[in-house]
């Protein structure tokens, strides 16, 4: 059984392989509460910032999340400085 899904392709080369583009709805507020069940989820703000739910602790701008990920914990200052502007 192949665990890959292809959209616009019959032979997916990754877990999700999209031959084309995708569209994300913009959000004027957090789409869901960032917790462990949605860790790693990506959302788009109404200001066209990509945000990711990091460690179930909060929504951070994508570039900031990549920088902070892997630390033992996120400080409140780091979280506020890189929080998404919904």
Image (cartoon, rainbow, N blue to C red):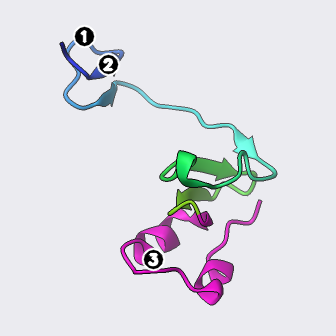
The residue beneath circle 1 is 10
Residue 83: image x %, image y %?
66, 72
What are the residue bounds of the magenta stretch? Answer: 57-86
Nearer to the camera, 19 or 50: 50
Q: How many marks?
A: 3
As measured in the structure, the alpha-carbon distance from the residue carrying label 2 to the one carrying label 1 is: 6 Å
The residue depicted at 62 percent of the width and 78 percent of the height is 79
- Disc number placed over residue 68 in the picture, else none: 3
Q: Is residue 78 magenta?
A: yes
| Cβ atoms at labels 2 and 1 below 8 Å apart | yes
Residue 41: image x %, image y %?
53, 48
As measured in the structure, the alpha-carbon distance from the residue carrying label 3 to the one carrying label 1 is: 37 Å
Q: Report which quarter residue 66 is drawn in.
A: bottom left
Q: Is residue 75 left or right of residue 71?
A: right
The residue depicted at 31 percent of the width and 28 percent of the height is 17
As measured in the structure, the alpha-carbon distance from the residue carrying label 3 to the one carrying label 2 is: 32 Å
The residue beneath circle 2 is 6
Residue 56: image x %, image y %?
56, 60
Nearer to the camera, 3 or 12: 3
- Which class describes the residues within 10 Å of circle 2: few (<14), some (14-19), or many (20+)? some
Please tell me which of labels 3 and 2 falls first in the chain. Answer: 2
Nearer to the camera, 74 or 5: 74
Nearer to the camera, 38 or 20: 38
Secondary element under disc 1, as helix, strand or loop, is loop
The residue depicted at 70 percent of the width and 52 percent of the height is 33
């Amino acid at each position: 059984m192949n665990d890959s899904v292809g959209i616009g392709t019959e032979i997916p080369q990754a877990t999700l392989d999209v031959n084309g583009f995708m569209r994300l709805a913009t959000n004027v507020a957090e789409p869901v509460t960032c917790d462990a069940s949605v860790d790693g989820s990506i959302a788009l703000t109404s200001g066209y910032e990509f945000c990711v739910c990091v460690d179930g602790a909060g929504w951070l701008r994508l570039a900031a999340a990549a920088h902070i990920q892997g630390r033992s914990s996120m400080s409140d200052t780091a979280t506020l400085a890189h929080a998404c502007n919904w």
